[in-house]
Amino acid sequence: MEITSAAERHLSSLVELYRQFHANPELSYQEVKTAARFAEEVRKAGWEVTEAIGRTGVAAILKNGTGPTLLVRIDMDALPVKEETGLPYAATGEVMHACGHDIHLAAGIGLARSLVELKVRWTGTVLLIGQPAEEVGTGSKRMIEDPAFDAVVKRSAAPSWCLSIHDSNEFPAGSVGICPGWATANVDTIDLTVFGKGGHGARPEQAVDPIVIASEIVMALQTIVSRKLKPGTPAVVTVGSIHAGTKHNIIPAEARLQLTVRSYEDAVRERLLVEIRRLSENIAAAHGSPKPPEMKIDPEYCPAGYHDPALAERMSGVFRRLLGADRVKSAGPVMGGEDFGRFGRRFGAPSLQYWVGAVDPARMGGEIPPLHSSRWAPAAEPALRTAVVTLTAAALDLLR
């Protein structure tokens, strides 16, 4: 098959590129060398490339006659994790590609090369995005808000579909996983400050203890999902941090909580935020707090990802014909965040991000380090092969 042959011709160089990206990770919005190398490789393949969109983002256009436009998003940033994989090309500092974006980068370059070689098989335009800062959930927002991005879209036309990939520690290399419908969550970050009245630990009656108030709030928040939402509604309210006080015998004047809140539907998200505020304020008032808690919601929340069911089914068929039915897996939704969904929302285009298996099949069933682990090491060659051939096949099917 032409698609497989094209991928195989470039596989050894793509593996080498993956290793270079892996050994030289860069944090969110610091992907200067990563973005430059990605842009260089795509430009060499024959694409029109624009750099420095949304700080370090890359957008590349390949036109091939008239037809619709397909957007393919590749994320580029790494994580503040010290690598412990023992790989010969392991990163040596305090930053690591612990989420597989190095695999994505090499696969995006493989797609760029393959589509140039297979121009007789498709017609239209492909818009290839190298996106910064996926790990902090704002990179797609920064790119979309940059006027330079609008200029690129005017040259390429608004996309009719949006695609992306993500490596997976749950599926064997050589396979893919597809989840139609809601797939990734709204991610809200909340800072909650509870106010009290400081005093001596031995004279609590003269104080208003914010630690007690905060503790009651933490427990009450756990009832929101179980008692304020319809049973079975996917949602999470987690208090990840609580800080208060300086000494054993001092009641502090305030306590600070940090929350992460996850949901799928916008109405559920709003209900969660309302209930967090209501419970916090009422509990604080019941304890005689001098003023209501201060609730700061990060305005740059990461929106939920929705995978168009028709597009998911269409791509499932493409991949079954390409890989075999047994290698196209059904994937469930997760409460993790992923800011790829902003592109589909921006253009009103059907979107799909699918999982690319990255575990050595011989290791399936054993202990596999999770994504974001300092020990996560994908089976690079088979994962890259699958990523490139599936992305290419998807593009050819949509733009045939």
Image: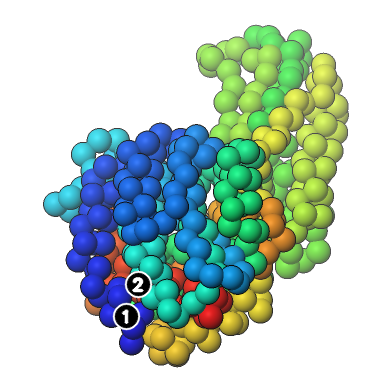
Residue 117 circle label: 2
Most extreme residue toward the left, as rendered? 88
Question: Between 10 and 282, which is closer to the camera in this rendering?
Answer: 10
First-in-chain label (2 vs 1): 1
Left or right of 338? Residue 286 is right
The picture places residue 161, in percent across and down from the top left corner, at 61, 67
Question: Between 155 and 86, which is closer to the camera in this rendering?
Answer: 155
Query: Which of the 4 quarters of the picture holds residue 142?
Result: top right
* Colour mapping: rainbow
The picture places residue 256, in percent across and down from the top left corner, at 63, 26
The residue positioned 53% from the left and 70% from the top of the image is 65
Give the distance between the C-alpha atoms of the residues marked 2 and 1, in whole angstroms. 12 Å
Residue 356 visible in the snapshot: yes
Query: Which of the 4 quarters of the picture holds residue 8?
Result: bottom left
Question: Between 332 and 73, which is closer to the camera in this rendering?
Answer: 73
The residue type indicated by label 1 comes to Thr
When the figure is inspected, residue 47 is found, relative to residue 212, above or below; the finding is: below
| SS for callout 1 | helix
Labels 2, 1: front one: 2
The picture places residue 371, in percent across and down from the top left corner, at 40, 56
Residue 4 circle label: 1
Picture quarter with the N terminus: bottom left
